[in-house]
Amino acid sequence: MLVGIIILPRPLFRDGYSTVVFDRNGKLLGAKVAPDEQWRFEFDTLLPQKFEKAILTYEDKYFYSHPGINIFSIFTAMKDNIEAGKIVRGGSTISMQLIRISRKGKARTYFEKIIESIMAVGLELTHSKKEILSLYSANAPFGGNVVGLNAASWRYFKRPAKDLTWAESATLAVLPNAPALIHPGRNRNTLKEKRNSLLEDLFNENIIDSTEYKLALLETIPEKVSPMEMIAPHFFEFVNKKYQGKITYSTIDIEKQRLLNSIMNQHAYELNDFGVENAAALIVDTKTKQILAYAGNLISGKVEIEDSFNDMVLANRSTGSIMKPFLYAAMLEGGEILPNSLVRDIPSYFDNYFPQNYTNEFDGAVPASVALSRSLNVPAVYMLQQYGIGRFLQFVEILGLTSFNKSADFYGLSLILGGGEASLFELVGAYAGMAKIVVDYDKNYGKYPESPYKPLNYVIGKSEEKNSFSDNKILHASSIWLTYEALKKVTRPESEAGWENFVSSSKIAWKTGTSHGFKDAWAIGSTADYVVGVWAGNASGLGRNGLSGTKTAAPIMFDIFSSLPLNEKFYPPYDELKEVEVCRQSGNPASKYCPDIDTITIGIQIKPVNVCNYHKHIFTDKESKYRLTQNCADISDMKAINWFVLPPVQEHYYAKKHPSYKPLPPFKEGCSEADGEGEMDFIYPTNNSNVYLVIDENNVRREMVFEISHHNRNAVVYWHLDNRLIGITNRNHQLDFIPDLGKHVLTVVDDLGNYKSVNFKVLH
């Protein structure tokens, strides 16, 4: 016995295992062969009762009573083998068979059997009977390259071993005895005879009753080995990288996964016709941040798909406008804006960067919430400039975006329009973290989870939420809720025409994004039940004109949402909300000069927003036709008015979209203010800009168009380039001119002596 203990291998088996991934309910998502090309699953010490009864009845009836060897069985086998002139019986116990399997194909001689017997006794001294039986069931051959009960159960019957019937358990119990001879798919009659013989023994031993016996005999033998499921191939590889050779129970819901696969396949045709080869999508549970479905790419077998092996859920791609809601929420939180605070929307130049709106139009000034719902680019750039690039990078890092790892100077203001890259996995995680805070607000009685922006959960039991809370809040629920209120007003794509009529329409807060060069299309939607994220584009980086988040990714997202039950809604975090009076025109807290007051709901802010400074206290004549001053009129002839005034360039574009806007009336002849600052401003060129002149077909430089905006439409303006008069304009203040290459100073002077200058440089 001592010799057996000394020579016993430790551990018995060093073979690698297959990677196996199940869904949240134990349904197989996918499996991969072990490194030695065998299907071998990790074993479970809890052996199913039916299989245990079957294998012991067939192989070793006295397993629980012998010490590892059965002398009577050995002598009986030796007698039968001598009489037959060949080996017809083994006489080995399960413990001896386990030792033989662990020794990897040693010759079946009497000498080797003696060694196995000694080692089997040692095995019994170091392992419990349950452990031995489990080790045997996990490592016994079951035909072909199938090793172990769990692998065999899935390969032959497509279900876990605990769900096997008596007939199926008996079928698998007879296989290890002669796996090369008896194999499902061939020798089926022999296999059936062996199975039925075992079922008869089980009946005779009163392990099964007559009804169970008769029903078991009616069951068929499997026709062939079933292929392993691979429902979510990209998710499987994602899990395999971290849990290789393990059995993993994931958070995936297989029914939602099949649903997502179907929707992605349906859209594969349309995307392929458009020249878009790849797309990815995630469905996440808002309350738990668990991934319920994961499509890393299109996998349709009916459409030829380039780069379909790439997992685009994990790929870092240009974000486009998908990060604008983060900035909006951060500025609400910081007290930089209120929902309807006006933001500039004018032609702008930032150190060689010229942001453009998708429509190539400008509103002059636009409420911040409208700028978000319409995804206007220029206001977003001004908002980022106000908030600070470095500060915003720190903010999104806390949200869980790890790919923005360069300096603020590297990204510049283009950061908010796709100047950086992020993955769908982390973006959806950030959105889900925000949504979870709002959903949990009432449930947690106003408390905040300690780490709401940790990565998405995808394995059961690995990253479960703990009931721990923190006062360290980067975003209050009120800021997020107000952001979602703006996102619910985003105009849906044409495929969602009439969306307002659906009950669920008010529950989805969503945002799209399109990267520069039409390379990436994004859509992420949030509800109290689910967060759904979609990316579409070409993994190769090839752009397609017309590709956009609204037209390409959003239809997929809404198809996904339409297939999901949306039962909950985002409830306002009432304890963090309050009503304030704001100026109707500017959206900021009302000053004493604001004549029109609205009452709106705002959330908690780090500091109060500055009061409205858009209203100017002026004096006019009785008809409000001309402005007056005490220098030219008696006080009795003057009427005091609080006038809504935008800066000249903003006014120029704002008036085109708002016919009711009234510019300041001109001064009555003989009247003027001592300080004319702010009367006019440049539309083009902007200060310190670089200008490239158009070259025509004759290689001749074309004129550039100088343009200003003036509060007084009737003003006469004198244009000076480098102190030389080059033109005079009235009402329409545009001037065509061809400046020389190099640096210039352009100065405009009106007939009241007000002036404005800009510096610019003409380049080749």
Image (cartoon, rainbow, N blue to C red):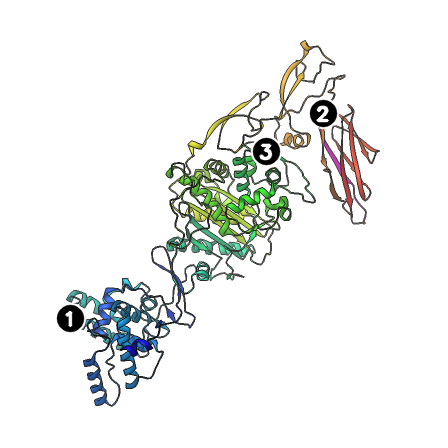
Q: Which residue is mark 1?
A: 205
Please report the bounds of the magenta region as a residue range: 699-714
Q: Secondary structure at mark 3?
A: strand
Q: Which is in the foreground here, disc 3 or disc 1?
A: 1
Tell me the distance, in whole angstroms, between the alpha carbons under discs 2 and 1: 107 Å
Residue 725 visible from this viewpoint: yes
Q: How many marks?
A: 3
Q: Secondary structure at mark 1?
A: loop
Query: In the rendering, at what x and y percent does residue 299 appear?
Result: 47, 60
Which corner quadrant holds the N terminus? bottom left
Q: Is residue 297 above or below residue 5?
A: above
| Relative depth, front residue between 631 and 550 | 631
Which residue was labeled with disc 3?
366
Residue lying at 67% horizontally and 16% vertically, measured from the top left: 620
Which residue is at the front of the view, 752 or 503? Answer: 752
Q: Position of residue 282 (x, y in %)?
A: 46, 51
Tell me which numbered mark, 2 or 1, is placed earlier along the sequence: 1
Is the residue marked by circle 2 packed among few (<14), some (14-19), or many (20+) residues within 10 Å? some
Q: CA distance from mark 2 to mark 3?
A: 23 Å
Q: Is residue 589 above or below residue 264?
A: above
Q: Which one is nearer the viewer's eye here, 578 or 186?
A: 578
Q: Earlier in the sequence, mark 3 or mark 1?
A: 1
For disc 1, the neighbor class at 10 Å (few under 14, some 14 to 19, many from 20) is few
Amino acid found under the numbered disc labelled 2: Asn
Q: Position of residue 571 (x, y in %)?
A: 41, 36
Q: Residue furthest right?
A: 724
Cα distance, mark 3 to mark 1? 85 Å
Q: Residue at x 58, y 42 (%)?
A: 391
Query: Could you tell which of marks 2 and 3 lies nearer the N-terminus?
Result: 3
Is residue 493 something one can see in this rendering? no
Say if mark 2 contacts mark 3, CB within 8 Å: no
